[in-house]
Image (cartoon, helix red, strand yellow):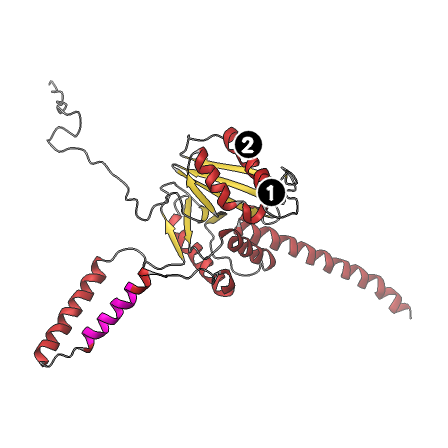
Amino acid sequence: MTQEKRKRPENGHGSGNGKSAKRFQFDKAGSLTPGARGCFVTCVRGKEMAAQKDVLLMFERHLERYPDLLAESVPENTGDDAQKEEDNEEDADDESAGGVENEYESELKALQQEAANDATKTTQKGPPPKRTFTPLRTNVECVLFIKFDRRIDPTVFVFRLMEDKYKSPREVVHGRFTRRMTPISGSADASLDGLKRALSQALPSVFSGDTGLGFRVDVDARCNDQLTRDQIIPATAAAVREIGGDHHKVQLKGHDVAINITLIRGYLGVGIVRESEKLKRYNPSEIHVQVLAQKETTENATGAQAEVLAEKETPDQGKD
């Protein structure tokens, strides 16, 4: 029994049945693009959605506890956008107030409005437009990105969150699937010029002071071959010297701050991490486990010493 070879389509695509193969394209809306500031979060493979929910809850509760992290100097919505919203609200009030003399017309308008609202709810997808924390797609396994409202400084926000976890390890940790967090305070396209722009956004707030700091440069590149470590590290060290002077020194161990350069495809982000060794490289799960274990060890040692002292005092009291 002979088998006939399947004919290849003339255009070289598809399965030979006249239908072209589908080409999937990601919509840029809701995806990570250069310019986004916020926080990278690594997580357990296959648990991205659960980790995203936990991280958003963690961030929102932290902001509720420390509302001062939301700067009041930058208004949330100003200018033409705010004026348009006010005009729309006034128009809606006028229409609902009516001035409709005929009862039939008013009922008809109410039904039309109800149908329009139902249609809006049906067609509206995704989160509401105004959000303090917005998840963006990275299209990379085990890596999440949460975009921050522009009034929040990612470096300060994440540092204080990790400090809280360190000081209160017994509190419930939201995010059993989350791992390392990396704040991003400057971003641009993944190129040498983009690196310089991102560094100029992130470094001045930390390195423009007179106090000398020891720093190291960490590079995390995923799905990116446009820049190498040999290009990134010297350029970053030169930018630190240009902004803060020669009193800032490279210090691989016992450093004051770590400069994290993260590259994902065409995106480049720069983040500053303080006390990374003490705060377990900003891993809340490790902070919870290790710091709690250290405190329990200290408490057990203190209790053992107290028992030894009590045993020593007991014979003396019996002799009396």
Across and down, in percent, residue 257 comes to 59, 45
Is residue 110 placed above or below 73 in the rendered structure? below
State the quadrant of the C terminus: bottom right
Q: Give the residue drawn at x 32%, y 57%.
A: 127
Mark 1 neighbour class, 10 Å CA radius: few under 14, some 14 to 19, many 20 or more: some
Q: Does the magenta stretch include residue 95?
A: yes
Q: Which amino acid does label 1 sit on?
A: Gly
Q: State which mark lies toward you, 2 or 1.
A: 1
Kindly state the secondary structure of the residue where label 2 is placed: helix
Q: Pointer 1: what residue? A: 244
Identify the image quadrant of residue 124.
bottom left
Residue identifier under label 2: 234
Range shown magenta: 84-96
Disc 2 to disc 1, how far (Cα)?
15 Å
Which is nearer the eye, 225 or 70?
Answer: 70
Mark 2: which amino acid?
Pro
Q: From where the camera sits, is residue 51 visible?
A: no
Q: Which of 138 and 241 is in front in this view?
A: 241
Direction right: furthest residue: 320
User: Residue 69: which disc?
Assistant: none
Q: Is residue 131 visible?
A: yes
